[in-house]
Amino acid sequence: MRILARYILKEFFPPFIIALICFTLMLIFNDLFRLTKLFVQKGVSPLYLVELLIYVMPATVVLSLPMAVLVAILLSLGRLSTDNEIVAMKAHGIAFHQLMLPLLGIAIVLSVVDLALIDYALPRANLAYASLQRDIRRHKPAFVLEEATVMKELETEGKLWMYESTDKKSGRMLNVRIWDNIWSGRPRFSDAQEASLGFENGRAMLTLYDGLTYEPATNDLDEFRVTKFQQQQLALQLTEDLERSAFQNQNPRSMHISQLKTFIGTLKSTVPNTKNPEYILQKIRSAEVEYHKKFSIPFACFVLGVIGIPLGLMVNKGGRMLGFGLGLAVIVVYYLLLQVGQNAGMNGMLSPAFAMWLPNIVIGVFGIGFNFWVIAEGKIHAWRDRDSRLALVVSRKVES
């Protein structure tokens, strides 16, 4: 049994490592193109791009690990099937469960590894990524000013702003609109005819000319106080030089499992006292989706292993390419279900727990069904072979 397990795992690890590298690179390419555009606009050192890609790596590995498990199982068992080694093993009395146990065992180990990555490495990387990206977006905003475009460099600080056009003579921005305190529940809106952006002591200052400011007058958001101004300065958290700063983010993706559980409990306790319960419920659903995702995605290593073993044994003449094609098909189905479930959980159409475990349930049911079918097929073949065997005739000479 130990020799068989070592032999199967020896076949498993080379395609697993190759598949993990390939899927990780495929997932990271989208971030690479997006970040390259940002760096071209901002004109900062490429070393920051490398640093951001390092922070993105845990998120991509967490997703690519279950994919690599499935493809590795299909390729390794496909190789054994096409070389008739599976037939030889059966001929020597090796049962189906003896082939299954080593692969399911390594799938469980990789599930634990994925869980450790998603609970320890991923929150730290997401927090560092958000911090560095914020500092980069705050760097030299004049390089990325675009007419009639909402600029979101300061969205995390609660500010959005835009302007419609630029005066060719004065160089000032025209018809400027600024949304401030958008996350506080008491937003403030400013509408100015002109504005100019400059730096004082390395800090950005937006000077507004001839405009109005609208802000809530009382706790009732239906009543606003309107203030007219001729000139007003607004400090923006933008810097002329790239500065690294500490960053505290209450995003559920940047929290550990224990922190996320506490965060959900805190949100639920505020629902009875809030004036906007739907907003809080939306945040609760989003946090619960992230909470259950931290368990469902690592468990996918085991679930995809369950369906991968019978599919790998079915590969006879198609070889490695057929196994790889089957793996891609199952992966596409799984992650489509994951995306659908995530959207349904956040929108309240399904409970967050059921929505995030739906892909595992669907793939797991099919996997268990395929395993029973393989086992039953083996028993049927054995029964047919028994009937087709020639009877052993023993003749005995009778002396007269």
Image (cartoon, rainbow, N blue to C red):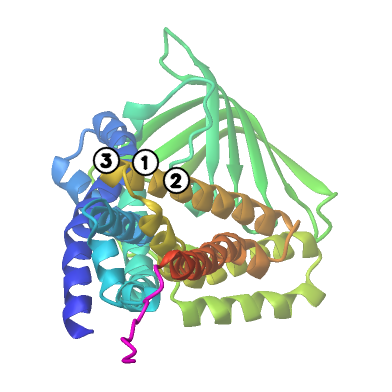
Discs 3/2, front:
3
- Report if residue 258 is visible in the image: yes
**In what element is the residue under mark 2?**
strand
Residue 133 inside the magenta-drawn segment: no
Q: Which of disc 2 and disc 1 is earlier in sequence?
A: 1
Determine the image quadrant of residue 325. Answer: top left
Is 72 placed above or below 239 here? below
Q: Amino acid at mark 3?
A: Glu
- Boundaries of the magenta span: 390-400
Q: Which label was assigned to residue 240? A: 3
- Asked if the stretch drawn in magenta spans residue 397, the answer is yes
Quadrant into which the N terminus falls: bottom left
Look at the numbered disc 1 and give the secondary structure of its residue: strand
Q: Quadrant of the C terminus?
A: bottom left
Q: Are marks 1 and 2 in contact (CB under 8 Å)?
A: yes
Residue 63 shows in the view: no
Q: Residue at x 67, y 59 (%)?
A: 345
Labelled disc at residue 204: 1
Indicate the position of residue 370 as horizontal and vertical percent values: 52, 62
Crowdedness of circle 3 by 10 Å Cα count: few (<14), some, many (20+)? some
- Kind of residue indicated by mark 2: Ala
The tag on residue 235 is 2
